[in-house]
Image: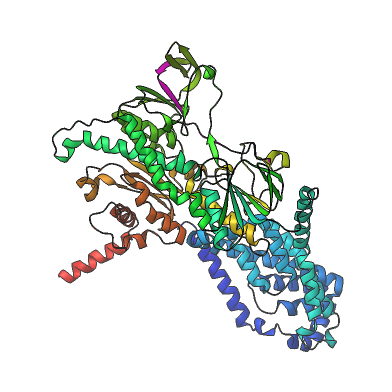
Amino acid sequence: MKNFAPKLVIILCLAACIYFLQRFGLTGELTLESLKAQQGILASYYSAHPLKMVLLYFLVYVVSTALSVPGALVLSIAAGAFFGFWLGLIIVSFASTIGATLAFLVSRFLLRNWMQDKFGQKLSGVNDGIKKEGVFYLFVLRLIPIIPFFLVNIAMGLTPIKTRAFFVVSQIGMLPATAAYVNAGTQLGQIHSLREILSLNVLISFAIIGILPLLSKKLIEHLKVRKVTSKFRRPKKCDYNIVVIGAGSGGLVSSYIASAVKAKVALIERHKMGGDCLNTGCVPSKAFIRSAKILSYIRRAPEFGLDPLQARFDFASVMERVQRVISKVSPHDSVDRYTKLGVECIQGDARIKSPYEIEVGNRTITARNIIVATGATPLVPSIPGLEQIKYLTSDSVWNIRTLPKRLVILGGGPIGCELAQAFARFGSKVTIVQTAPHILMREDDDVSSFMEEKFKLEGITLLTSHKAKAFGKNGHEYWLNCESGGKENRVEFDEVLFAVGRQANVKGYGLEELGVSISQRGQIVVDEYLRTNFPNIYACGDVTGPYQFTHTAAHQAWYASVNALFSPLKKFKVDYRVIPWSTFTDPEVARVGLNEKEAIEKNIPCEVTKFPIDELDRAIAEEEDHGFVKVLTVPGQDRVLGATIVGHHAGDIIAEYIAAMKHGFGLNKILGTIHIYPTLSESNKYAAGNWKKANAPKKALQLLEHFHSWRRA
C-alpha cells in the first residue's frame, strides 16, 4: 500500500490532463484537415513569436505522446510545415521520444508490478527474451509501424527493458518514420491523406531496415556455425535422423519421442539399458530404503499397539531383493521394448568423429543430429591415503552382500542421507562426514535441523563442518582423519562410501577432440535449446545439468529430441520454471520452487506460511505425525513461489504445489478444492487455510461482526 498514494496522484494528473485536452477541444483539432485550415494563422504566429511557438509546440507534442492522444502523426506533419525539415525533424524526434519515455515510465510505475505479480510465471519467457534481445524487438517495432507506437510504449513499460535503452532505441528507431512525416509537412498543400505519406513502398522500406539487426544477428550465428563445421564434410544422405548416445533416462526418452514421430533413430549404449536410474540409482536405492523402512516399522511395533517384535534378516537376501526389483523394472527400458518401438539399439562404445559421424566398434554411422545423454558418475575426490583403502560409491554399493559394521559416508546431500539412514536401520554404525555446517545444505535451516535431530535419534553420528584430511590403514583396520576448527578427529570404519556429488561423463566420446565446449565444472555447455556449439549436436541429462535428476533428464530429452528433429522450422526453449525434487529419507523432504534461503539470497520478497503435520488426523492415525508444510507466496497474494514439505510421503503430497506453480493457480484454489478425509494431502489444504487466516481482511471482518451483532438485536 506504500505506493498507492503516488500512483493515485499520477492517475489524477493523467485524468486532469485528458479532461483539459478534451474540454478545450484540443484532441479534436489534431487532424490533417484542421491543420490545413489553420496553416495560415499558425504560420503568422510563428513569424511573430518563433521561440514561443517552438516551445509551445514541443510541450504539446510531449504531452500528447505521453497521454497517447490520437494525432501525433499530424503534429509531425505540422513540424515540417512550420519549422522546415531539419528543425522540425530535431524537434519532433526529441519530443516524441521524451513523450514516449514518459508513457513508458507511467506504465511501468502504475502497472508493471501488478502485471508481474499476477502473471509472472506466464511472462517469464517474455521477460527472459526482453532481457536478452529486447533492444532488437523494440527497434523492429519502431521501424515497422504495424503496431501503434503508443501501445509499444505501454507494453514495453511492463517489461524489464532498461529506461535508457528504451529512450535511445526509440530515438533512433522512430527517426525514419519521423523524417517521412516531417518531410511530407514541407509539402502540406499537396497532401490530401495520411496514406499518401506512408505508402506500401515506404512501409516495406521500414520493414527492411527493421529486420536488418535481426538478419545481422542470424548472419553472425551462421558464421559461428560455419567456423566450427566448415572443416567437416556433411554426408549427402544420413543413415539416421538422430543418433542418441546413452540409454539412461535422457537417452531413452529422446529415442522414444523420435521414434514416435516416425524418425529413424539409433540408440547406442556401452553397458546396460536404463542407465544409472535403473541399475545403480533410483530403483535400487528405493528398493533398499523400503526394506529398511519395513524393518523400522517392525521395531516400532509398540507404537501401533503391538507386542515388541524382533526381526531377523539376512543382509545378502536384502541385496538380492534389490536386484530382483531391478530385474522386474528392466523390461520397461529393455532393448526388446525399444526395438519394437522402432529404435535401433546398438551396444558398444560410441565415439563422435565429426558432427555427422559416430564410430561404434568397427562401424561408422551417419546422423543428421546427435544427442549426447551419457549421464554422470560418482565423484571420488583425491584424498591422501585413498590408494590404501577400498571404497564404495552409489554405483558399487549394490555389489556388497555383507552389512558393514562401521560405515563412514562422505557427503551429507540427498544420496548420502538416504543411504546413511537405510544402513543405520539395518544395524550399521553410520557416521556422516560433511564439510558444510548442516546436512541437506540446499534446504532451509529448519529442514536440515529437523532431519539432523531425526538422524541422531536413529543413532547416526553427524560430523558436520568436518573436512576429510587423510585415510589410514593398519592391517585390516581403516580410519579417516577429519579436521574441524583446527582439531583433528579420527573415525574408524569397515567401509567408506563417497556421496560428494557426481561428475559428467564427457571423456572417451570424442567430444573434446571434436571441439564441443565443456564448462569448468566438466559439463557440456548448451544453449536454451540444448544445442552445443555444434548446432546439430545436442545434450541432455546429467552430462549437461543444471539439475541432476532423472525427471529433469526426461524433461530435457523432449526438448532435445523435438528441437533436433524440427529445427530451424520450429524450436523450443527448455523450461526450467518448475523443477521439483525429493530426498527419500524418512520422513521425506520434497521441494519445488523457492525456499526461504534462496529468497533471501536473491532478495525476493515473500510470505511464509507453515502447517505442522502433527495436527493432521491421518498422520496421527499412522504414527507419522511429524514434519511440516511450508509455502512461500507473493506478499499479500496467493501465488505460490515455492513449497517445501517434510513428512511421510512428502514426494507425493507436493504434486499439488507443482501443478499450482506450473498452471498458475494459487492457494485460494487449493483451499477451495475438496480433499478426501482422512488423507495426507489434506495438509496442503490446511496450509492454504493458514495462509487465508493470515491474509483475512480485518476491517471487513470487523464490519461483519457489527452486522451480525445488529441482526441479533
The structure residue drawn at horizontal position 62% and vertical position 37%, both measured from the top left corner, is 522
The image shows residue 459 at horizontal and vertical percentages of 30, 26
Image quadrant where one finds the N terminus: bottom left
Front residue of this view, candidates 7 and 331: 331
Residue 326 in sight in this render: yes
The image shows residue 250 at horizontal and vertical percentages of 54, 49
Image quadrant where one finds the C terminus: bottom left
Front residue of this view, candidates 104 and 438: 438
Front residue of this view, candidates 620 and 496: 496
Q: Which residues, given as a range, are shown in magenta?
A: 489-510
The structure residue drawn at horizontal position 73% and vertical position 71%, both measured from the top left corner, is 144
Location of residue 46 with respect to 108 vertically, above or below: below
The image shows residue 18 at horizontal and vertical percentages of 59, 76
The image shows residue 76 at horizontal and vertical percentages of 77, 76
- Would residue 629 be found to the left or right of residue 704 on screen? right
The structure residue drawn at horizontal position 15% and vertical position 32%, both measured from the top left corner, is 308
222 inside magenta stretch: no
